[in-house]
Amino acid sequence: MRRRGGSKDWGGSPSDVFAVVDRNSDGRPEYVHKLVVDGINTPNGIALRGDSLFVAAYEDAGIEKGLIWRLDDVHQHALQRKAYKRGDADLTVVTDALPGDRWHGWRYIKFDGDGKLLVTIGAPCNVCDLDDPALGTGGTGKLPYGSIVRLDVDAPGSAVQSVARGVRNSVGLEHHPDTQELYFTDNGRDELGENLPDCELNRVTNDGQDFGFPYCANAGTGGAWRRSPGPGRIINDRALNRGGTVKNCTREVLQGRVKQPIQAMGPHVAPLGLRFYKWSKDLTAGFPQSWDRTLFVVQRGSWNRKQPIGQRVMSCVAYLPFVTGWLKRNATDNSESWGRPADIEQLPDGSLVISDDSSSTIFRVTWEGTRV
């Protein structure tokens, strides 16, 4: 989900890319337009730069591979209700070098301040050795699994830069509006029980940092429903690193070779999109100034935990629930929910929109009352 001005949101579905058009910026879209009628297989991550929309997708013909498409002049297509189709000059492939695995293959993409595209490449497994040469499909370029990389979309074929590694499955990227440091979510592995390990909120302070997967993970402190602020404690993975036989994770952290999260988010909560709130006095539907630089993190929620958890929007640094209600408080199974939030975006008027990939709904959150 992305926005430009007050007029358009972009969203994807299993087979389509849509523009949600609000011409007069009143928070009520006039229409939803299907942007692509042919050519893009399973669009997922999207990123907007200028008048071009970039879309991560797949190609199944021949070798399975991941692609990133570029849709030029996208605003006029949305406003004039024009659609792209394969073969159009303004629908082109930026790269087809991404792995084609569907397990953790849905990508989050985002531009940095230099106009380079950050791309997540999930591990094609629950837990596995990322250096195994037989792992996954590899695509055409053998880009590293379990990583976040940086691509220059204006120079196809140029060197790929490592941003972070040891990342199991990140589906959310955000830059701090002041420092431009990268924050990202990561989904912890399964099959270690109801309460281990924690999903993570991470911060990259230098390119190429290792965040531990698959050998190291984290266990938060406090209750599983809402962890105490902080990273929790580092633990060795019981399957690949029992007893620290491959890596002594505590020592790796102390010596700076593995980086812990800034917040342990709880077990199996599945954090996805995240967004820093940017306050200004001109926001007509904005929150009070006290919310400025608050980080909102969307949690899609668990799928295999006996008592479901997550399905909410959290605010950080205090790590408090911000929007709840998708999941009944004491739900005993996933049938006791009516949606799964996926991503969050701030509109130019200061309101927030939250996408739900279960009910195919976009919610808008506005502030009521005094904005002081």
Image (cartoon, grey):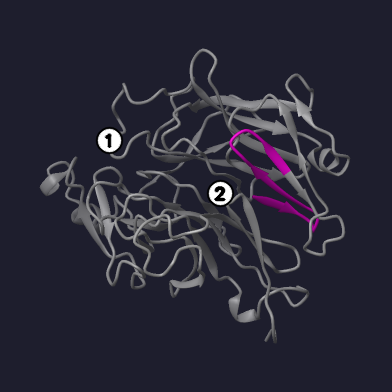
Look at the picture and state if 77 lies above or below 275. Answer: above
Give the secondary structure at mark 1. loop
Is 33 on the left-hand or right-hand side of 142?
right
Q: CA distance from mark 1 to mark 2?
A: 28 Å
Q: Is residue 226 above or below residue 119?
A: below
Name of the residue lying farthest toward the top: 62
The percent coordinates of residue 85 (x first, y second) are: 75, 25
- Element marked by disc 2: loop
User: Counting other residues with Cα less than 10 Å from the Cα at mark 2, is it few (<14), some (14-19), or many (20 or more)?
Assistant: some
Name the residue located 29 percent from the left edge and 50 percent from the top edge. 257
Q: Quadrant of residue 372?
A: bottom right
Q: Which residues are magenta?
A: 1-18
- Nearest-to-viewer mark from 1 and 2: 2
**Which label was assigned to residue 39?**
none
- Mark with earlier residue (1, 2): 1
How many numbered badges does the structure rendering display?
2
- Residue 304 on the magenta span: no
Q: Decide: marks 1, 2 in contact (CB < 8 A)?
A: no
Residue placed under numbered mark 1 in the picture = 128
Q: Say which amino acid is labelled 2.
A: Asp
Residue 172 in sight from this viewpoint:
yes
Residue 357, label in figure: 2
Measuring from the top left, give residue 9's x and y in whole percent. Answer: 72, 51
